[in-house]
Image: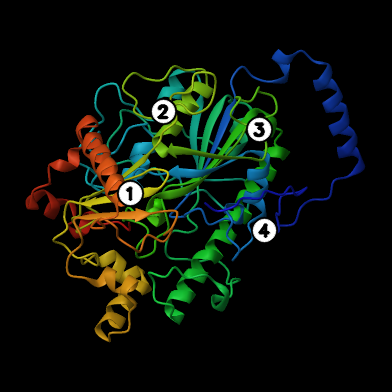
Amino acid sequence: MRCFKLTYSRDYNVSYQDEPPICFMNLLLRKLTLALLLSAPTAILAADKPNILWLIAEDMGPTPSCYGNKDITTPNLDRLASEGVLYTRAYTTAPVCSPSRSAFMTGMYQTTIGAHNHRSHHGDGFTLPEGVKVIPHWLKEAGYFCTNLKELPASFGFSGTGKTDWNFEVPGERFETGRWEDLKSKGPFLAQINFHETHRKYIGVHQVNPDKVTIAPYYPDHPVTRNDWASYLDDVLSLDKKIGVVLKELETAGLADDTIVLFMSDHGESHVRGKQFVYEEGLHIPLIIRWPKNFAAPKQITPGKVDNRFIESIDLAPTLLRAAGLPKPAKMQGRIFLGDDVEADRTMAFGARDRCDETVFRLRSVRDDGYRYIHNFTSERPFLQANAYKERSYPVWNLLKELHAQGKLTPEQEFLCQPTMPEEELYDLNADPHEIRNLAKSEVPEHQAALKKLRSALDRWIEETNDQGRFFETPEVIREQTKPSKKQKA
Ligand SMILES: [Ca+2]
């Protein structure tokens, strides 16, 4: 387990743009407003329900410095964590955009609702099961204004992507059309801002020295790897600056004290063994939640807290609905983790990967406190199974193949270049955080016990959640869904 130490800083680092000077009149006005608010009854201080600002990064692991990364400093995310709660064991249920987003926006496993094959339902009219809805639709019914902001005021200096990438159709609009300026008058609101940083191509300003970055042992320590990893970190820094701008603007708009701020990533890093695979690097995500001052915080939230409970990304849906005063919908699989009626803490986190583009895999995984177990249902296929997107976008994907041909890889790196995958993998996460020593065939009693426990938990999960990945698509469906006119970047 890494050590986490949070420090407070006074201001968001908004070097993204110049901060306007605070003049004397502004200070006086702020003091007068504060005095008026303090003397007003609580009902006037805040709306009945908190606003929710939901900030979603792409393809990023727990890389900010508040997670212990020494290679970069992310002052804005660090400060958000120091004012809120940092979740150290938050996991997405899928390591790729559309299944992951389909899951956390409905509070349902993507494998249960049939959204598990990446972008497999674009344009085919596929809908959610009866009783399952996306969060903005639940909240809209409860009077929330729900928007996914793209255009932002000029003072931000950037736009949101507006990404949804849900792998199903919904009745009506996904979100309401809105502008940042609307948030003041249309509360309570759910506003998402989606960021393109940390999704390939990396476009951040070069700041990180490739010679100084830490390379995981399963990747070749090579200039190509170092440059690629440094570029990822450059993008994390760019994202951090944008987060600083958004939080500053929230304050300036006078909304910070009425708005829950939630920061997360949609899944892990888009590196060879990260995105689209079910190791820590693909499933472990950053998650930070800050509670607004004008609403009583749930007892699980105190500023600066580090929360080590297992959180699955599907748990956000029922938790946010409860924060908005709504009951958890009957079918929702996510668990409420904040408030007076929290559900049992998870002891495990599950993840699943199915077809991505033309590349068919069925990988299932579960981890607990000590171990990660993986069942490769398509073990006859190579880890580096052909994928045009990766060959085009991942320099290390091709580097591995070249160095493999030259016999220059270590055993940990060579593992990725084998013609088949093991049917089962088991890693001791405490002794082997990089998941490079597969213990599935170990005869050590402790390893055997962990294997049996997690294998049976995963088998049970597949049955109980009605995992639709048991039924593979036909070649005709795959051909139709992957024809050039339907292809998008992953
Ligand atoms: Ca993504």
Residue found farthest to the bottom: 406
Tag 2 residue: 335
C-alpha gap between disc 3 and disc 2: 20 Å
Q: Name the image quarter holding the C terminus.
A: bottom left
Residue neighbourhood size for the residue with mark 1, other residues' Cα within 10 Å, grouped as few (<14), some (14–19), many (≥20): few
Tag 1 residue: 446
Query: Residue at coordinates 32% horizontally, 52% vertically from top-left?
Result: 278
Mark 3 or 2 closer to N-term? 3
Considering only vertical position in the picture, is 66 above or below 175? Answer: below
Say left or right for 38 vs 307.
right
C-alpha gap between disc 1 and disc 2: 30 Å
Mark 1 or 4 closer to N-term? 4
Kind of residue indicated by mark 2? Arg
Kind of residue indicated by mark 1? Glu
C-alpha gap between disc 3 and disc 4: 29 Å
Tag 4 residue: 16
Query: Residue at coordinates 54% horizontally, 19% vertically from top-left?
Result: 340
Q: Are marks 1 and 3 in contact (CB under 8 Å)?
A: no
Q: Are marks 3 and 2 in contact (CB under 8 Å)?
A: no
Mark 3 or 4 closer to N-term? 4
Q: Are marks 1 and 2 in contact (CB under 8 Å)?
A: no
C-alpha gap between disc 1 and disc 4: 51 Å
Picture quadrant of residue 224: bottom left
- Is residue 348 or residue 370 the one in the foreground? 370
Q: Nearer the viewer, mark 4 or mark 2?
A: 2
Kind of residue indicated by mark 4? Tyr
Query: Residue at coordinates 67% horizontally, 36% vertically from top-left?
Result: 303
